[in-house]
Image (cartoon, rainbow, N blue to C red):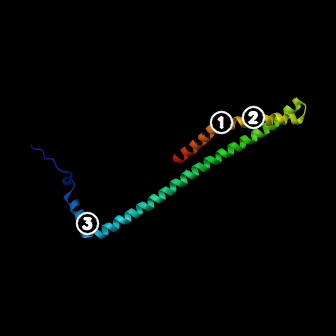
Amino acid sequence: MQLVFQSTKSLIPFSFHTIIKTKIMEDPEKLIESLLESATEYGKTSIELTKLKIVDKTSDVASSFLSHSIVIVIIAFFMLFLSLGLTIWLSKILGEDYFGFFAVSAFYGFAALIYYFLIHKWVKIAICNSLIKQMLK
């Protein structure tokens, strides 16, 4: 028994090769038109896909921003009323109304300086990285 190795061309049915060669030889203009139509359709589909990806990422970032904004507003109101309560309480302890306001404003001024000189860069980098991660997700 003798094994015969066949090339990949001979594995494809003869009629298929004949059909392809015949189509190319018979009507190359139709083949080029068909190729151009396919390329045009591919381009339109690629543009549509890109638009949909942009809409998806934009809506994802916008919804994330909105939900975070709502949480920040709620925390801001909490801090406002907590500060007012603390101010009134300190005013009663210190004896004068303005001493409580000075104490609380001094605390916030000190916290703002610490944030600006020590923490600002790290928070900025973390926010940028978060936005980039959401855009590339």
Q: Residue at x 51, y 57 (%)?
A: 51
Dot 2 surroundings within 10 Å: few (below 14), some, or many (20 or more)? few
Find the residue positioned furthest to the front: 117
The label shown at residue 110 is 2
Q: Quadrant of residue 17?
A: bottom left
Q: Residue at x 83, y 35 (%)?
A: 102
The residue at the point 23 percent across, 64 percent down is: 21
Q: Which mark is residue 24?
A: 3
Reply above or below: 86 against 132.
Answer: above
Q: Position of residue 97 (x, y in %)?
A: 89, 36
Crowd band around label 1 with a 10 angstrom C-alpha radius: few (<14), some (14–19), many (20+): few
Residue 119's disc is: 1
Disc 1 to disc 3, how far (Cα)? 69 Å
Task: Report the amino acid beneath label 2.
Answer: Phe
SS state under label 1: helix
- Label 1 with label 3: CB-CB less than 8 Å: no
